[in-house]
Amino acid sequence: MLKNEIESYQKPVFFDHKGSLDDFIALMSILTLDKYCISGITYTPGFCKNNNALETTHSILDIFCHSNLPLAVCKEPLRNEYSYDRNILCISPDVFNNSEIQKPLNVPQTANEDAAGFTAEILLNTVSKTIVIATGPATNLVSTLEKYPEVADKIERILWVGGAFLCDGNVIAPDHDGSAEWNFFADPHAAEKLLSLGIPVTLFPLDTVTQYPLDNYLLYHLENNSKKRLSRIAYQLLKPAYEIHHDFCIGSVMPSVYLGMPNIFQLDSKSIKVEPRGTSMGNIYRSTMGNRIKQASCIDEEQFYDYLISCFGKF
């Protein structure tokens, strides 16, 4: 592969997602960032029953004229499958009928190699170090780093949506106490491994995410800006979710908002461990023997929502 042709003023971003509704809102927000450019995308199945995540990803890329952006699917098994009661957080199977997202006529082929090989190839052949945005479990990233350890030197930092510190988790599973967040519970061993590799990690945990639910303020302004295509699409995707799930949180957008407006976030350093087994599997806790991470907290609610409104008002 030739060196990725990323304009010198744009920082490369690799997007590793799980196909949830807010992941697609996050993808749209990343693509609006002027100083960043997506170099590749991987998708880890398992969060949603319906199988239109790849088509939706390609459709959003088409909107931004990035239809040739490389994409691969992670086929590594998850330690714990997501509960299918999470499907209210998934993209609607009727998305292509009920929104302006058009089903691609010819869905490009995904990479033939495994997602780990694909990820390694993209990162190793990008001239500068890459920022990785992860909104799902650590399965693909850890598989990549185990098979291609040299990739670690090509990652500037990982912005990861996941974990729960002082708030309740969102896992509903037999013999589990509910203390963990789903991305850590889905593959707790991969989570602990990723944190132990020495790559700088910034976590956007449930403690932060749940403070910023989808609300009427955001929906009102998206609808009010309906002359702009991105605002219309975001509204068409989010409104049905809000009607079903009033405390629906769009946590996956946190890393892209952080890249666009880092000044509205506060970063606190912590050393943490991941519970690998038992009734608290996937729970994270502070430990002097743990791995060093930064926890991101958003400190300005109004600017957070206004930033998203401005992103989706670009065209």
Image (spheres, rainbow, N blue to C red):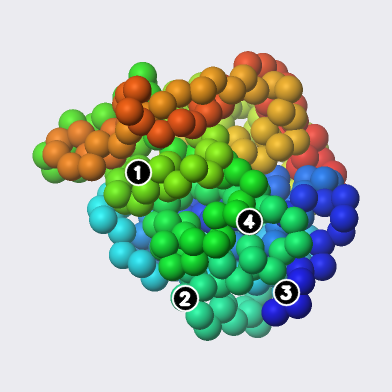
* Residue drawn 75% across the image and 77% down it: 2
Residues at discs 1 and 3 in contact (Cβ within 8 Å): no
Of marks 4 and 1, the one in the foreground: 4
Q: Is residue 212 left or right of residue 12?
A: left
- Mark 1 vs mark 3: give the one in front: 1
User: Closer to the observer: label 3 or label 2?
Assistant: 2
Considering only vertical position in the picture, is 158 above or below 70? above
- Gap in angstroms between the C-alphas marked 3 and 4: 23 Å
Labels 3 and 4: the sequence-earlier one: 3
Where residue 123 sits in the image (x, y, percent)? 63, 63
Q: Position of residue 11 (x, y in %)?
A: 77, 50
Identify residue for label 2: 114
Name which residue type carries label 4: Lys
- Residue on which the image places disc 3: 68
| Quadrant location, the N terminus | bottom right
Mark found first going from the N terminus, 4 or 1: 4
For the residues labelled 3 and 2, the Cα–Cα distance comes to 18 Å
Give the CA separation, mark 4 to mark 2: 19 Å
Asked if labels 2 and 3 touch by Cβ distance under 8 angstroms, the answer is no
- Horizontal and vertical percent for residue 69? 70, 69
Pointer 4 or 2: first along the chain: 2
Residue denoted by label 4: 154
**Residue 148 seen by the camera:** yes
Q: Quadrant of residue 50?
A: bottom left
The mark found on residue 192 in the picture is 1
